[in-house]
Amino acid sequence: MTKPCGFEFWRSTLKGARYVVAPMVDQSELAWRLLSRRHGAELCYTPMLHAQVFVRDANYRRENLYNELNQDDRPLITQFCANDPEVFIQAALLAQDYCDAIDLNLGCPQMIAKRGHYGVFLQDEWDLLEKMIKLADEKLSVPITCKIRVFPEIEKTVKYAKMLEKAGCQLLTVHGRTKDQKGALTGIASWKHIKAVREAVNIPVFANGNIQHLSDVQRCMEETGVQGVMSAEGNLHNPALFEGCSPPVWEMAEEYLEVVEKHPPCSLSYVRAHIFKLWHHTLQIHQDLREELAKAKNVAGVAEVNRQLKQRCQKEMAKDESEWTQTRLPFPHWICQPYVRPPKKFLVTLELDSVSVKRALEDGDGSNDSLSKNKQKKKARNPNKNFCPELKPKYIKCEQCGNPKGNKCVFNLCRGCCKRKAFKEVADCPGHGLRFKTKALKQCKSDTGGGLTNGTVSTAVHDPL
């Protein structure tokens, strides 16, 4: 049977889904997907799964996909991060019978993705990506899709999208932010980039970015012409976003905890993280219960904190409106609503039309007021610690991987690369304490009864890696 492609895949398999819950690490688990589907979501993604771990670890497969099968959780797309075509295909083949499509993550901008060399850090390796997508399109029984971030230049973004389409991608999700737009520098997503991609390709396109309310979804679809809109943070703070309503937080929290109880197992860390997100605004006021939630040892403990938060909010609601806690939020703090990152010490100016992205620090005095809470704690432990990028020591990069090289390395490499090279060449590196040549010579001497002094060194050494 021929697998559906492009718009046929979107219309038949995905049932023309318009409202999409994004793949979120440790957050888009089964219980949250089911809750989101109850409140308007039409398509969900699994959390991002690591292809290499998925292939080698049966427990990882069971915990993250196989044990989460549910007839109410379809259509479902499984997302992988990978940088090796063969490993990606092996993982996808193991997952394809449990989902409706396989997605390749080309959008994760976090440091862990940079270290692992996946996500958005593959966006310049077009030959590798073309090979991965082509292989997946040929080998899999389900369609292959991709989630990407944009380049600063619209033209390059369009060329990138068309390359993925030509390679075999059947649906493209475009996050309208660049690789560098994350954390305090998140800024505004460019719908112009998304619109340009949509007009250039002949496959369905989902938009991602700037979605906080249902009105944003409708406006995005009108302005870009996309087939669907994906939400991540908006969904985490209000799982009823796609219904166009903002219910009291405790209603969503109680319903989520009920789903968790009905569909075990669910990691306590996932549950706690969701409750923290839902109650984010209220926990800024009731700091004592924030601590209690962090200490909760089980789901019952989380439910008890939720009950106390509900009671406190209902007591406040019973008062005159003038006595409510004053915030800068559009709704009272106990109502589900988006979290908007404050600009703090950063001024982010995005001029995507002129292909320029300018970022400047508003204040660089290094005072504690300008530091994050985490950095303030580090400063308290070490008063001499400096967080100014200009004053940090400059490290010489490893010639192979870009990590800091060892100062005394004979190969000018980091320890990992040096270890591989020294093993391969049976060499020593005193700077990293590696003695492969010395050990091999000693082994040869003992094998020949001390008769070998300067002969050829055997490479039959156990791989240290």
Image (cartoon, helix red, strand yellow):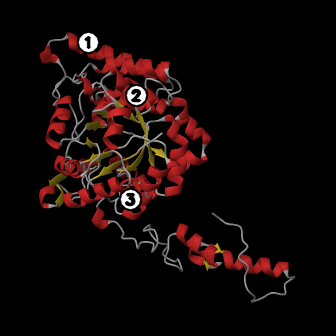
Residue kind at label 3, given as amino acid type: Leu
Q: Is residue 447 left or right of 198 when viewed as pictured?
A: right
Q: Where does label 2 land, which residue?
A: 32
For the point 40% across and 28% down, the residue is 32
x then y, percent, for residue 398 = 45, 72
Residue at the top extreme? 318
Please give the label number shown on residue 365: none
Q: Which of marks 1 and 3 is nearer the N terminus?
A: 3
Q: Do the residues labelled 1 and 2 touch (CB within 8 Å)?
A: no
Q: Where does label 3 land, which residue?
A: 122
Q: Distance between the residues labelled 1 and 3?
A: 52 Å
Q: Nearer the viewer, residue 146 or 237?
A: 146
Q: Does dot 3 land on a helix, a strand or a loop?
A: helix
Q: Are marks 1 and 3 in contact (CB under 8 Å)?
A: no
Q: Where does label 1 land, which residue?
A: 315
For the point 49% across and 29% down, the residue is 268
Q: Which of 420 and 312 is in front in this view?
A: 420
Residue kind at label 2, given as amino acid type: Trp
Q: In this view, does 128 lie above or below 27?
A: below
Q: In this view, does 34 lie above or below 350?
A: above
Q: How many labels does the image show?
A: 3
Q: Which of marks 3 and 2 is nearer the N terminus?
A: 2
x then y, percent, for residue 355 = 16, 61
Q: Do the residues labelled 3 and 2 touch (CB within 8 Å)?
A: no
Which corner quadrant holds the C terminus?
bottom right
